[in-house]
Amino acid sequence: MGKTTGFMEYKRMDESYAPVEDRIKNYKEFTQPLKEEEVKTQGARCMDCGIPFCHSGCPLGNLIPDFNDAVYRGKWEKAARILHSTNNFPEFTGRLCPAPCEEACVLGINEDPVSIENIEKNIVETAFKNGWIQPQPPLTRTNKKVAIIGSGPAGLAAAQQLNRAGHMVTVFERDEKPGGLLRYGIPDFKMEKHVIDRRLEVLEKEGITFKTGINVGIDIKANELQNEFDAVVLCGGATVRRNLPIPGSDLKGVVQAMEFLPQNNRRVDNISFTGDEILATDKDVIVIGGGDTGSDCIGTSIRHGAKSVNNFEIMPMATTERPENQPWPFWPMRLRTSTSHKEGAERFFSISTKEFKGDAEGNLTGLVTTEVEWEFKPGQRPNLKEVPGTEKEWKCDLALLALGFTGSETTLAEQFGLKFDGRTNIEASENDYKTNVPGVFAAGDQRRGQSLIVWAISEGRQAAHHVDKYLMGKSELPLKGQGDLPRV
């Protein structure tokens, strides 16, 4: 597999980035790809480890050693077939996935792991460049009709798989264009939207119908869907944002990240939007929340021309090394520094926001914080304590709340009469993705809660198998790790 001694001969290489002073002037992707021979060398580092733990680390069960070997040998079209056999959209995961496969790489025990994500991105981009990715409409149709609600990665994956099975698939999306958070949430500098459009063109030519600007549950009721379609798959995501219920949270200038980021996506795409314009230009910006969404807010604010950008995280600063209680091959909670963090933001850990301050007109002018300490005891919930005498007031014109999501919206699910878990996620068994209502399925964040793009694609694929089985009595659509090697 690969070159037998490759992992001893070659060091890991990653894409480089355009200089900060250049890339913050626009919203273009700024990665600078490796040369073809360099990517092949990276594939050679895959070490024939016997048990490929990267398979289990990847929620899709990608056949990673197989496509690494094909890349090393220069068999790019074969690599593309292998990659697409388990992953419908490697151009998305190759840009946006945090790569749990790399954390599970055997080489990563004592060396830098194989650069799996970058190899994946190079495979799919080579495939598009050479015209190997072509529409594959089914040869026959079943005359069964399936409605997919939501066009994020879970909905798109479910749609393509069910279309391959021959069903007539309609995807409903309430926004102007399909893509979900891929389009309206992920900044363009992380993934330009022509990447989505390129894949959507393939899906449409395969026979999938997209209906945008339709808010299902309001514009179309649940009973109408049940009357028109043989099955419904809910892939609407976990979109209910977590608030910060402290004094002053209603001030103008306290903004949810998922209002700020989608608006900028529309601005870049020259699409009009409703509501007040939210700009960080010449403002002191504080981003509250240390995850990926917080990082996205930082990079966007810097591109707006913010006067200053600070980032608050209530948790203590993690170590750069794998924590002892999170051994290989499990996903470690280590300190992760994004490209946006390196563009000019200052990060503060173990800090809690206590109050927002405003002027007489209701505009945000600052906020008050205190330092906190965490007590971690085995088998118990962590205990948070404020550190006396550490209160501090910060100047702030724009506070962006990047605090994650608490669950999914319930309007449509309530119309169906579906059951929820404690976080308003739809109850649907992982064994068959069925809800308590016959013919209604759920997948992605709307079923499992806020998660990764790679999990969303996996959920969509898994759900499609069970929807097909429900409609036809059996299904040949692959489950996790069962590649069907489609022609690309």
Image (tube, rainbow, N blue to C red):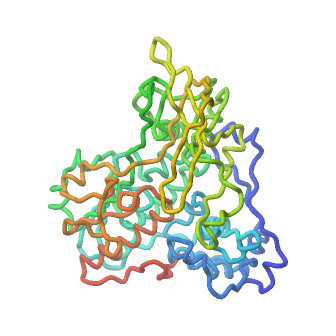
Q: Residue at x 54, y 31 (%)?
A: 399
Residue found farthest to the right: 9
- Residue at 21 percent across and 66 percent down: it is 436
Residue 270 in sight = no
Quadrant assignment for the N terminus: bottom right
The mark tally for this picture is 0
Residue farthest to the top, as pictured: 360
In the displayed structure, does residue 159 sit left or right of residue 92?
left
Would residue 354 be found to the left or right of residue 9 on screen? left
Q: Residue at x 19, y 69 (%)?
A: 438
Q: Position of residue 69 (x, y in %)?
A: 68, 82
- The answer to whether residue 218 is left or right of residue 353 is left
- Which residue does the image show at 18% across and 57% down from the upper left? 417
Residue 465 placement (x, y as % from top left): 35, 76
The answer to which of 265 and 177 lies nearer the viewer is 265
Residue 399 vs residue 213, the one in the foreground: 399
Reply above or below: 304 against 60: above
Q: Is residue 323 visible?
A: yes
